[in-house]
Amino acid sequence: MLLWIILIPAIASALIGLCKFPGRPTAIASATLSLLLSLAAICCPAGASSEPSMLQFTLDLPLSRVMLLLTALVTFAAALGLRAPSPEAARSWAISMLLISCGAAGAFMSDSIIAFYGFHELALIPTFIMIGLYGRGDRRSIAWTATIYLGAASMILLAGIVLLCHQMGTYSFSEMKLAVAAGTMPSSPVLIGGLLLLGFGTLVSLFPFHSWAAPAYASAPTPVAMLHAGVLKKFGLYGLFTIAYIFGDSCTELFMPWNKWLLLCLLGNVLWVGYVTINKNRLDTMLGNSSVMHMGFLFLGFAAYINFSAVNELAFVGAAILMLAHGLSIALLFLLCGQIESQTKTLELDSMGGLGSKLPKLGFLFGLAGFASIGLPLLANFPGELSIFLSCFQGAEMGASSCSACPFSWLGCLFGGVGPLQIAAICSMWGLVIGAIYMLRAYRRIFMGEVQKASSRATTLSCLDISSAIILAAALLLFGLCPWIISNLIAG
Amino acid sequence: MTANLPWLFLLLPLSIAAINWFFFSKKPGMAAALSTVSALSTLALCIGMLMGCCPTESVSYNWLPMFNGISLNVGILADDMALRMMLVVTSIGSLVHIFSLGYMKGDTSNLSRYFAGLSIFMFSMSCIVLSSNLAMTFIGWEMVGLSSYLLIGHWFNKDSAAEAAKKAFITNRVGDFGFLIGIVLVVSAFGTLEFAEMSGRAAGIAPAILTTTIICLFCGAVGKSAQFPLHVWLPDAMEGPTPVSALIHAATMVAAGVYMLVRLQVSMGAEAFTPTACQVISIIGAITALLAALMATQQDDIKRVLAYSTLSQLGYMVMAVGLMAGEAAMFHLYTHAWFKALLFLGAGAIIVACHHEQDIWKMGNLKKRMPITVSCFCIGTLALIAMPGFAGFFSKESILMAAWDKSPFCFWIGASVAALTTFYMLRVCIIAFLGKERGHGAEHAKDVSPSMLIPLILLSIMAVISGYGIVANQLVPFNGFEAGGFHIGVPFYAGTAALILGAIAAFAIYGFGGKQKDPLAGNCISKALRNRLYIDAFYDKVLIGGIQYVISEVIDFIDGFLIRGIIVQGFAYGVSSFGKLLCWMQGSSLRAYGIVMALGAIIVIFIMAFTF
């Protein structure tokens, strides 16, 4: 069954490409099928597992189900909301969209580490091509930057992965877990940890390796932006968390030497890129940057996970929820951004205004997505962010007298237990304020105030457009009200 | 089933809000009816629980369960304090719903959205009041922020309303930044978020940490209860419909900060509130009370006067919390809720009657035009200025007594604020109700429809009787509240003197309504007070337009030019240039070979000559 989840989009894209099937309907059919299959696979796990092979698919890894759910949901919404300038473009958009989703699903379900890597590379290719062919603005240069940047990151990552697998003597996640349980450790853990962090980190646009991300998202066609920012970018985090999970308590040996660098970089994501985002006056660039900014919170979750000697379950669950929630909310925002552009023919925030009274439903959905992304309770991002922040502090033993390891001695001596992680967590909470500033400012400029010329062009949205957005919005609400669904998915 | 009855306080308004929003967006009548019925049923439920007819136990749920470490729970803590607070919230909420039916009649905006917003507010406020742990408090905390945003921005096509809504949310977020730090510090210091498990744990924690934790949590209250320096959003929030101002920005939501602090005092125990933390809290409260009262003396918009008066009274409450007089703070919160809701709804009725005129200098002689509304408003005024016999007198007296015992500084500020309060409230009454009509609106004004009058009359009754011990002992939201009775002493003399002084000043300056413009206006002090002591201008120009703008401009420039331009693209350029160089070296040009060979020969000779 798992194989079919990957084969269906591949077959559908072949049909569109070779047999000239129409783009949107085929994509919708394929996405519906994969969604149903994925839901079935997530709800009733198949216990039978055979000998590990190169293409062994499994949902036993803790994050697989969550990420598969995310992939299926976002693909489905992107297919419904597919809106290409011409039938020819619709075909290639649909093909690339299906290939990305096929690659992402494959990566999230692979037990073999090499297949995990290969599927991600497969999914990256259509991204570059689509930006180069159909992007906005200076698309060729943006596409090249992203290609080279991500290509280099993948090389570094490959080196790390190969080194890891070689030293552990296995190429599969499940066997590696057994090897760790038996006490095997790689002989050069620090190097491997560094390569993995650098490689995965660049793929997730960790500061200062983030320059490719915002322009690429801003330029990419809507479905590609949705799938890449929403789904594919989670690949790096998925990899980091899965490897850390496999190593359990001893993951500190791999990653802790890089802890301070990681903390500095993630603060760069939250604060530095946050202020960059405040300064953006185009909706697409703003959303691209905000997506980069929110990766900082996820890296904070990773830092919290590796920072405590005991397994920090709260950080893991929080990060899983936030990965899902961020994927849903940013995909919804990019989807609505595309609809706003098709209605008003502009994305400059200054020339819009009052769109809320012309298109109240769009205003509601955008508001919901925006508030979700800035962490409003009852929407999915909030439980994720709150758990990540709490996880940085639980068991931190405030008031312990030692302040030796703390670089910020003036604060450290006051509190004792406050270490770099806690300081980074407190600083990144300011990101919640930054998020509110740029998101509410954008909302006010697009939807509130008097109706401007660009907004007066708006007519109506089609039923499919609205329903594609409603799916994502409903998922955000559902997981926001009942986050325990996700923690159950992780527990298996 | 009955074990979960208190959950109705949360689920009923939330589901009604969703139904109104999604299904009745085109049927405002249905939406209004549903929301009102939901508010009234929560009121009935609350009364039932207070009388002991309904069970108050409930199950708490694992919202995000964990195998090890802290789980996020949602649970209900329905003690006397919470239930009595719920009584204030649901009864004023119900009255405001009823009042809105009249007030919003004929409004062309989407009324379903308005009533859905009110229901979201009822949900989130109940979430704060009934929460059994800090995480759930934070959920309600953010959600009241959302409802406030939605309702202030109800007329979102108006630029001023859109700006005010945004300002309210972002200012509150700044406070919540501190609140969230406080919450994570509580997790690491106390090891729990549940109120029920906190007691007694403070003793083992270092005072420096306790102080920081309490001050961080207090930041949340500074935002939500609009204390200095985050008070700037509340006056602007008056852009929302007046019933909203009465419910959210006067009676209940802005008091949530005080409620939260008293809840912490009760559950953590008094020893958690270290002297330093208490000093910070009481001084911030006193400063807010004084500054807001000063600014209120020179406002011309009737709603703005009331907004500044709310700030000032909240300052009193926060000061009382800082003086460790949580009982007095909750007493004042409770009386203030009644009479301030009365004043706001009265102002709303006046505004409707004067055809949406809010400037008191365009009113006048309303005592003749709309006698019932005006007498209700005057009862509210008497309660606010602490006239003996009215509700405000008892609660203000208890705060002044606490201040007299603990801190002379707070006491004298409290007493002078009392004089200022009398002055600015009598100013409004004299100008708006006495004298001659100064505008068209006032000439055609007449008493409003019953759906607006009945809430006013009911609230007037509460504004009189709620302070007496026989009522207060049953209803003040504090576990085991006992009205202290008042003693003839310095606080009483000071309060009465303040009242008389303020009244004399008001009548001396404004006479009996004959003035056409403010005799105090025109000088630099009045100008400064009208411009809110330039605090808002400072934030706009220096913090937002200056520092934040420069930071984001500079960072954006460096990000684009240095990181993206020079480093990333420069690296790419370097690599491709190096590639070109290699190409050139092994291209088919004979000259290139010659140059490379010559260079190599020179290097070889150089090395051989100098190393051997």
Image (cartoon, coloured by chain):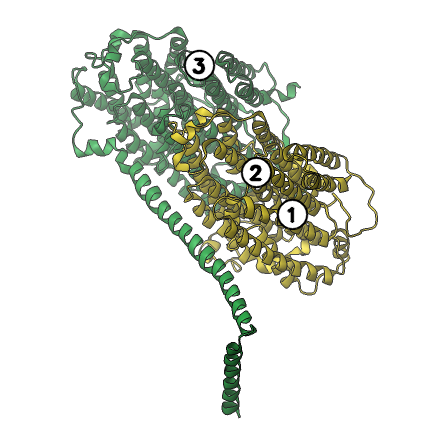
Q: Front-most of B363 and B278?
A: B363
Hey, what amino acid is under mark 2?
Answer: Ala
- Tag of residue A226: none
Answer with left or right where residue B185 lies relative to residue A75.
left
Distance from Cα at disc 2 to Cα at disc 3? 42 Å
Q: Which chain is green?
A: B
Residue B141 position, x and y percent, is: 49, 32
Q: Residues within 10 Å of mark 1 (few under 14, many from 20)?
A: many
Q: Colour of chain A?
A: yellow
* Chain under callout 2: A
Residue under the point 32% across and 45% down:
B546
Distance from Cα at disc 1 to Cα at disc 3? 58 Å
Up the image or down, B611 lies above or below A345; here it is below
Q: Front-most of B144 and A229?
A: A229
Residue A1 position, x and y percent, is: 78, 39
Q: Are marks 1 and 2 on the same chain?
A: yes
Up the image or down, A44 lies above or below B343; here it is below
The label nearer to you, 2 versus 3, is 2
Residue on which the image places disc 3: B95
Q: Front-most of A277 and A182?
A: A277
Task: Locate residue B364: give its quadrant.
Answer: top left
Residue B339 position, x and y percent, is: 37, 18
Task: Locate residue B347: give its quadrant.
Answer: top left
Hey, what amino acid is under mark 3?
Answer: Leu
Residue on which the image places disc 2: A331
Q: Are marks 2 and 3 on the same chain?
A: no
Residue on which the image places disc 1: A123
